[in-house]
Image (cartoon, rainbow, N blue to C red):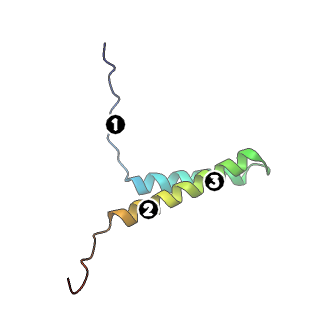
């Protein structure tokens, strides 16, 4: 028997979803006392921001080298 795959149409871009998650995680982290859970939320927020930046960078068109 094969499993059915849940398919969902994304209404926001990947960058928008990553930014929203990062903002939400930072807000939750600020409401927590210092500790492991707070640090994990801040780390995940930073990872999502870096991922968003890399995705933007990778999706930009490549400029051909001059003189070649």
SS under mark 1: loop
Q: Which of the image's four quarters has the N terminus?
A: top left
**Is 57 placed left or right of 62 in the picture?**
right
Which residue appears at 72% of the width and 44% of the height? 37
Proximity of marks 1 and 3: CB atoms separated by less than 8 Å: no
Residue 48 visible in rendering? yes
Q: Is residue 42 left or right of residue 10?
A: right
The residue under the point 40% across, 59% down is 55
Q: In the rendered structure, find residue 46 and report the number of the disc placed on it.
A: none
Residue in the foreground of this view, choosing between 59 and 33: 59
CA gap between label 2 and label 1 equals 24 Å
Q: CA distance from mark 1 to mark 3?
A: 27 Å
Q: Position of residue 43 (x, y in %)?
A: 63, 53
Res. 23 in view? no
Mark 3 highlights which residue?
43
| 18 lies left or right of 60 | right
Q: Circle 1 sits on which residue?
A: 8
The spot of residue 42 in percent (x, y) is 65, 54
- Mark before the other along the chain sequence, 2 or 3: 3
Image height of 52 relative to 40, above or below: below
Q: Which residue is mark 2?
A: 54
Give the image quarter of residue 30.
Answer: bottom right
Say which element carries label 2.
helix
Closer to the chain start, of discs 2 and 1, is: 1
Question: Which x, y percent locates residue 32?
Answer: 75, 48
Report crowding for label 2: few under 14, some 14 to 19, many 20 or more residues within 10 A (C-alpha).
few
For the residue carrying disc 1, how many other residues have a C-alpha within 10 Å: few (<14), some (14-19), or many (20+)? few
């Amino acid at each position: 028997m094969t499993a059915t795959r849940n398919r969902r149409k994304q209404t926001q871009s990947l960058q928008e979803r990553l930014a929203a998650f990062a903002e939400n995680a930072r807000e939750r982290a600020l409401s927590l006392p210092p500790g492991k859970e707070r640090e994990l939320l801040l780390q995940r927020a930073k990872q999502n921001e870096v991922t968003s930046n890399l995705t933007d960078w990778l999706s930009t068109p490549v400029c051909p080298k001059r003189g070649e």
